[in-house]
Image (cartoon, rainbow, N blue to C red):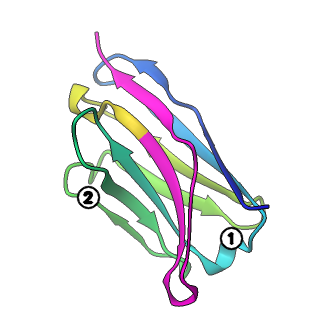
Amino acid sequence: QVQLVESGGGLVQPGGSLRLSCAASGFTLSLYHMNWYRQAPGEQRELVATATAGGSTNYADSVKGRFTVSRDNAKKMVYLQMSSLKPEDTAVYYCNAEWAIAGRNYWGQGTQVTVSS
């Protein structure tokens, strides 16, 4: 059974930091690109960061220099370290596993991040 379980969300003040974790099970993590998306109320879901199966990383312009995505294939974990958080980072953050060639795409249930004083 495929599962992606996010954790680490919460309430943080502007300028603070959080680390989100995504625990993967039921599939071979190393074959997948691992993405973090977020969705704010009334907004479309947007891609925030990617840790590719090949080991590279990509970021949305809005989070470059503030967020860092990493993965540990052996532990089947993916992380999103978020620093210098802003109120506009407030959203539900989702972990996503993508293996486009095989047509496989899995989602976690999301974790709420709220940046507010």
Looking at the rendered structure, the kind of residue marked 1 is Leu
Report whether 45 appears left or right of 73.
left
Name which residue type carries label 2.
Answer: Ala
Instruction: Report the front residue among 32 and 101.
Output: 101
Residue hosting label 1: 29
The residue at 45%/75% (across/down) is 56
Lower sequence index among marks 1 and 2: 1
Disc 2 target residue:
60
Instruction: Give the quadrant of the N terminus.
Output: bottom right
| Residue 82 seen anywhere in this rendered image of the structure | no
Asked whether residue 29 is drawn in magenta, I would say: no
Asked whether residue 110 is drawn in magenta, I would say yes
Residue 107: quadrant of the picture: bottom right
| Quadrant of image for the C terminus | top left
Task: Classify mark 1: helix, strand or loop.
Answer: helix
The disc placed on residue 94 is none
Is there a contact, CB below 8 Å, between mark 1 and mark 2? Answer: no
Q: CA distance from mark 1 to mark 2?
A: 22 Å
Looking at the rendering, the stretch of residues picked out in magenta corresponds to: 93-117
